[in-house]
Image (cartoon, helix red, strand yellow):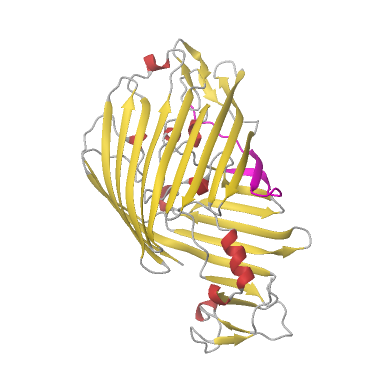
């Protein structure tokens, strides 16, 4: 990386506890005899290489924060710590049916519609992150990223990403290998399409990108099982990791096609005898983004057994494993499916509109529909929105959402929501 300029634009000097009479836009000269000196600089003055590293290592999901406005760097330019995030406030109005959640999740449309409208406001998705990029003789070029928002219990800080990445390896907590964050369409709704796979997990992953236009990723991931059991069965601590694999073909800059798979073993025990059983779960997935001039297309299709926790909708229902209808001492993994298709039209560099339709479905086997007549069978999700980048830091948006929930007994409930968003990034 290029060494930083001797005269650098600095901020926040007073908040650092300095006794010097510095002002908010004063230049600071770094002494050549102080090689370990640190300064906070504007990203505009950080040098092209630092900017490129920060931008290319930015996480791809639509709700991930932008490149930080300010960074902390050493005089030699070997290390740079980005400090950033955003403040995001959303006001929503549900009418003609509600979703009983701050996010628009069709699976959580109440079976009994006692309330037909509601107003909510949410600022818990406000985000803070630290990103260190640099070089060391042991790791080579590396990235350390920590990030969180305020969606923990009681609006406490909740970890979203915490990982170390170097030489193609990723170690830590971040997006799983059985999802495609860069293929997600833009929504104000923080969760997004109900048929999308979306999850984070602790993992060891390796990405190989040595072939032109191709990427290959293999990950070993920490398992978690969300199941519906009776009194006779319990979910034990999982002792076998999940394995994911994907291959991705890229073209024309922002376009790609990805094929992915996951395999997992889920363990449960009999409460009285402590005997355990294992059930195999698996999934296959195809996802894509395609840029056609001012139009961007997005899509994903996923099918498998015992992978409910990875879907936005089914993940709320504890259906990785369920009881068999005729044997309360045995669990089964049901087939399930999810998909979405979206389109975005970029009217100008600062204004775009988009629309998305999505569905998730839980299938029945071994008579499951007979004991789950009023339980979720499939859900649908439709979104239409407009986003305006009012300034380099401020984005405004408006969105309409419509959702349906259909149970195994064919009863259907619906909900509608209007979202209004203001987001300021720093």
Nearer the observer, 131 or 258: 258
Could you tell me how many numbered marks the image carries?
0
* Most distant residue in the right direction: 137
Region rendered in magenta: 201-227
How far across and down, in percent of the image, does residue 404 sit? 30, 33
Residue in view at x 56 percent, y 31 percent: 284
How far across and down, in percent of the image, does residue 275 sit? 61, 17
Q: Quadrant of the N terminus?
A: bottom right
- Determine if the magenta segment contains residue 232: no
Q: Is residue 280 above or below residue 352?
A: above
Left/right placement of residue 113 relative to residue 44 reads left
Q: Is residue 235 above or below residue 220?
A: above
Nearer the observer, 88 or 252: 252
How far across and down, in percent of the image, does residue 121 sit? 30, 53
Q: Quadrant of residue 88?
A: bottom left
Residue in view at x 59 percent, y 15 percent: 273
- Determine if the magenta segment contains residue 226: yes
* Most distant residue in the bottom direction: 21
Residue in view at x 45 percent, y 20 percent: 230
How far across and down, in percent of the image, does residue 7 sit? 61, 85
User: Can residue 202 be seen in the rendering of this structure?
Assistant: yes
* Most distant residue in the front direction: 293
User: Can residue 151 be seen in the rendering of this structure?
Assistant: no
Q: Is residue 208 above or below residue 72?
A: above
* Most distant residue in the top direction: 326
């Amino acid at each position: 990386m290029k060494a930083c300029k001797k005269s650098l634009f600095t901020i926040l000097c007073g908040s650092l506890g300095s006794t010097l009479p510095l002002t908010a836009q004063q230049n600071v000269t770094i002494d050549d005899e102080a090689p370990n000196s640190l300064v906070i600089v504007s990203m505009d003055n950080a040098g092209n290489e630092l900017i490129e590293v920060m931008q290319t290592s930015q996480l791809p999901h639509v709700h991930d924060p932008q490149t930080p406005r300010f960074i902390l760097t050493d005089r030699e330019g070997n290390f740079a710590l980005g400090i950033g995030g955003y403040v995001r406030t959303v006001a929503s109005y549900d009418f003609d049916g509600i979703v009983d959640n701050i996010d628009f999740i069709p699976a959580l449309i109440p079976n009994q519609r006692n309330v037909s409208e509601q107003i909510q406001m949410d600022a818990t998705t406000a985000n803070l992150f630290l990103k260190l990029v640099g070089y060391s003789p042991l790791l080579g070029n590396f990235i350390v990223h920590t990030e969180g928002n305020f969606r923990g219990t009681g609006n406490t800080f909740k970890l979203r990403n915490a990982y170390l990445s170097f030489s193609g390896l990723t170690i830590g907590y971040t997006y799983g290998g059985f999802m495609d964050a860069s293929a997600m369409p833009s929504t104000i709704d923080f969760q997004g399409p109900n048929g999308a796979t979306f999850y984070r997990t602790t993992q060891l992953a390796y990405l190989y990108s040595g072939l032109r236009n191709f990427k290959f990723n293999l990950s070993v991931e920490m398992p978690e099982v969300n199941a519906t059991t009776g009194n006779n069965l319990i979910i034990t601590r999982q002792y076998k990791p999940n394995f994911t694999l994907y291959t991705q073909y890229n073209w024309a800059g922002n376009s790609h096609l990805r094929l992915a798979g996951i395999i997992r073993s889920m363990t449960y025990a009999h409460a009285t005898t402590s005997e355990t059983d294992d059930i195999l779960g698996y999934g296959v997935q195809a996802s894509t983004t395609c840029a056609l001039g001012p139009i961007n297309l997005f899509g994903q299709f996923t099918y498998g057994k015992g992978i409910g926790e990875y879907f936005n909708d089914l993940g709320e229902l504890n259906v990785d494993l369920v009881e068999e209808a005729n044997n309360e001492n045995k669990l089964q993994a049901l087939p399930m499916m999810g998909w979405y298709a979206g389109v975005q039209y970029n009217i100008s560099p600062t204004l775009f509109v988009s629309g998305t339709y999505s569905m998730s479905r839980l299938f029945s086997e071994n008579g499951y529909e007979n004991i789950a007549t009023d339980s979720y069978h499939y859900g649908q999700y439709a979104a239409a929105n407009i986003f305006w980048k009012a300034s380099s830091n401020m984005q405004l948006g408006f969105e309409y959402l419509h959702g349906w929930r259909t149970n195994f007994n064919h009863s259907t409930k619906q909900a509608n929501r209007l979202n209004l968003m203001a987001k300021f990034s720093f």
